[in-house]
Image: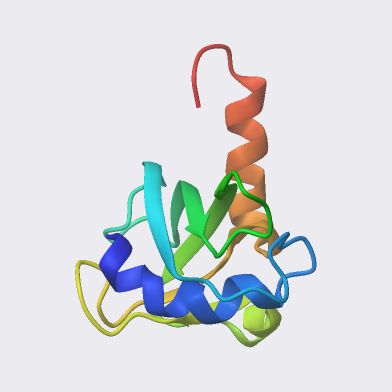
Amino acid sequence: LLPSLAPLLHEWLPRQRWFAGKGRAVTGFRLVAATEMVPLDGTAGPGLLHLLLRVEQPSRSVRAADDCYQLLLGVRTSLPPVLAGALVGRVERGPLAGRTVYDALHDPRLADVLLERFRRPGSL
């Protein structure tokens, strides 16, 4: 999964206002956890991925500590125009090849799924 998303995330993450590593090159990623919150098979509409991702960058201090990010990514075969501003990119290889990945929190449908999961007891 990560090898197919890495080229997109390499470009997208540094452009996000909340990205802590601005001004430093991204040298790699390490997937801490990945959860398919809504199936990615396309039969139930958009898929939803929850990722915990460590971003590797040159450190400004003696002790390097990679930043960890929580990403909620929507996955669709095509992105509706209303979600164009949330685009991460189109996956070219791997298990998501041909699909479009975007910031899921901009999608009211997937945001509702996430909020509903928070309301239910137990784990997400």
Q: Residue furthest top?
A: 121
Q: Position of residue 46 (x, y in %)?
A: 45, 62
Q: Is residue 72 visible?
A: yes
Task: Give the total number of marks visible in the rendering.
Answer: 0
Q: Position of residue 22 (x, y in %)?
A: 72, 71
* Looking at the image, residue 11 lies above or below residue 44: below
Q: Which x, y percent locates residue 88?
A: 54, 77
Confirm whether residue 42 shows in the render: no
Please name the colour scheme applied to the rendered image.
Answer: rainbow
Q: Is residue 98 left or right of residue 111?
A: left
104 horizontally vs 78: left or right: right
Return the residue found at the far right. 17
Q: Residue at x 45, y 78 (%)?
A: 8
Task: Indicate the quadrant where residue 95 lies.
Answer: bottom left
- Between 61 and 83, the one lying in front of the other is 61
Q: Position of residue 55 (x, y in %)?
A: 51, 57
Which residue does the image show at 56% across and 48% down from the upper left?
64
Q: Is residue 60 left or right of residue 104?
A: right
